Amino acid sequence: MVQRGGIIRSLFTFRGSEQSVRATEPLVIFTDAILAIAATVLVTQLTIPENLKANELRHILFSQWSTFVAIFVGYLFLAASWLNTRRLRRMLRGVDHYATVLYLMMILTIALIPFMMLLLARTVGQPDFSVGVQVLAFLSFIDGVFATWLLQYSAHRGLGGPHMTDQAWKEVLIPNYILTALDLIAIVVAHWLPWPVLIFIGADWLYALLPLFTDRVGFPNSQRGPVEPVP
């Protein structure tokens, strides 16, 4: 007679404590591929007619100024995402199944960046520009939610390296809590103040380009040793 719940337990491992901890390299490689594709798709938004008339090039380039701005903002997000994945790898000694799923959901925002930037470029100067900024703020909020959730789960699960003390996790999590909350507020405020919110979102992503404590000389790489399951 099969014990109740035995079949389910034989098929699934819902308890995080029973899941194996694996290296983060495959996720980093997957992220690099998504980032490369997204960056390439961003540039394809620029167009130049085949048959140019005399003195027309300047006008064509100037008419695409909103696309140039959108590409810059989109690349800013991609650069911030790349840096954050490197920092995350240095923080963690590995990931279990739930941490992997949270990481993949966070990467979804990277895949959506080309569409979001096209939406933003097409709505500049239009009545729906505030909607485009709201969508961008929502994307930034979702990215912050999954990133913070992943960090919080990793701290609780003990997936950090030996250098990730409680104080180190606090230094990482508190700014994420604040920025994610501000992104949520930005979604609402963008309806009335789209340009200030767009500037704030850009500043939010610029924060990730600043040298953080994980970039200090001597900060240990947590994956130099073998990955061991969490007891």
Image: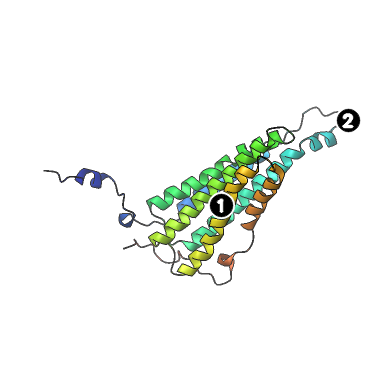
Residue at horizontal 68 percent and vertical 46 percent from the top: 198
Q: Which mark is residue 181?
A: 1
Residue 221 visible here: no
Question: Crowding near pointer 1: few (<14 within 10 Å), some, many (20+)?
Answer: some
Residue hosting label 2: 54
Rendered position, 76 above or below 121: below
Q: How many marks?
A: 2
Kind of residue sitting beneath label 2 = Ala
Say which quadrant the C terminus sits in.
Answer: bottom left
Q: State the image coordinates of residue 35 (x, y, percent, origin top left).
A: 57, 46
Question: Which of the two discs, 2 and 1, labels the residue nearer the N terminus?
Answer: 2
Residue at horizontal 64 percent and vertical 36 percent from the top: 131
Q: State the image coordinates of residue 148 (x, y, percent, origin top left).
A: 50, 54
Element at label 2? loop
Rendered position, 72 above or below 207: above
Element at label 1? helix
Residue at horizontal 51 percent and vertical 60 percent from the top: 173
Residue 91 visible here: yes
